[in-house]
Amino acid sequence: MSVSEMSVGEMSSWRNVGTPLWAHKIILVSASEVFEAMFRFDSQNGKVENVPDVEAAAFKVMLSFIYADDLSELSGDNAMAVLCAADKYGIEGLVSHCVQIPIQNLPNVFLAHAKARLFSLEVGK
């Protein structure tokens, strides 16, 4: 099924743990070649896709980015899980944002290390 043949209302459900997450196929296809390949020959509306290797919270963050360019739920705590999901599904813009999270926190790490050394605390053991 090509994008032009896809109805705007066609939905797909994503299940990991808990409540399924619903998303419009046409939105996903427009965001990623990976999603386009997944849905190219899939005419079944409402099909449940299992994603056992992606955390549900990370998938939600990815959907927020795809739908609204929303990064409000992306944090240092979930950046690696979101990075794995974004990389798996080819969401390059989100990959770039995830990679920036640890870089932004490097000054804090170096400051903490310097303070620990100042007070003769063991670091990294």
Image (spheres, rainbow, N blue to C red):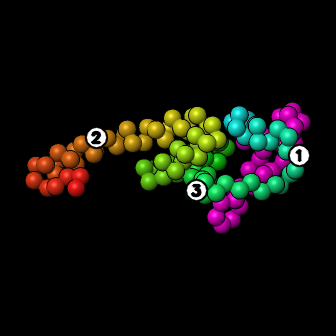
Instruction: Determine the CA span between mark 1 and mark 3.
Output: 26 Å
Label 2 belongs to which residue?
107
Disc 3 residue crowd, few under 14, some 14–19, many 20+, Cα 10 Å = some
Check if residue 5 falls in the magenta segment: yes
Q: Can you tell which mark lies on residue 55?
A: 3
Judged left or right of residue 16, residue 10 is: right
Residue placed most toward the observer, 61 or 33: 33
Image quarter for residue 125?
Answer: bottom left
Expressed as whole percent of the image width and height from the top left, the position of residue 48 reads 77, 57
Number of numbered discs visible in the structure rendering: 3
Image quarter for residue 51?
Answer: bottom right
Residue type indicated by callout 3: Glu
Tell me which residue sits at (83%, 55%) in the image: 46
Instruction: Determine the CA span between mark 1 and mark 2.
Output: 50 Å
Which element carries disc 3, helix, strand or loop? loop
Depicted 96 relative to depicted 51: above or below: above
Expressed as whole percent of the image width and height from the top left, the position of residue 116 reads 16, 51
Marks 1 and 3, the one that precedes in the sequence:
1
Residue type indicated by callout 2: Pro
Tell me which residue sits at (58%, 34%) in the image: 92
Marks 1 and 2, the one that precedes in the sequence:
1
Tell me which residue sits at (74%, 50%) in the image: 23
Label 1 belongs to which residue?
43
Residue placed most toward the observer, 23 or 91: 91
Image quarter for residue 53?
Answer: bottom right
Q: Which residues are magenta?
A: 1-28
Expressed as whole percent of the image width and height from the top left, the position of residue 118 reads 10, 49
For the residues carrying marks 1 and 2, which lies nearer the camera in this image?
1
Instruction: Determine the CA span between mark 3 and mark 2.
Output: 29 Å
Residue placed most toward the observer, 54 or 66: 54
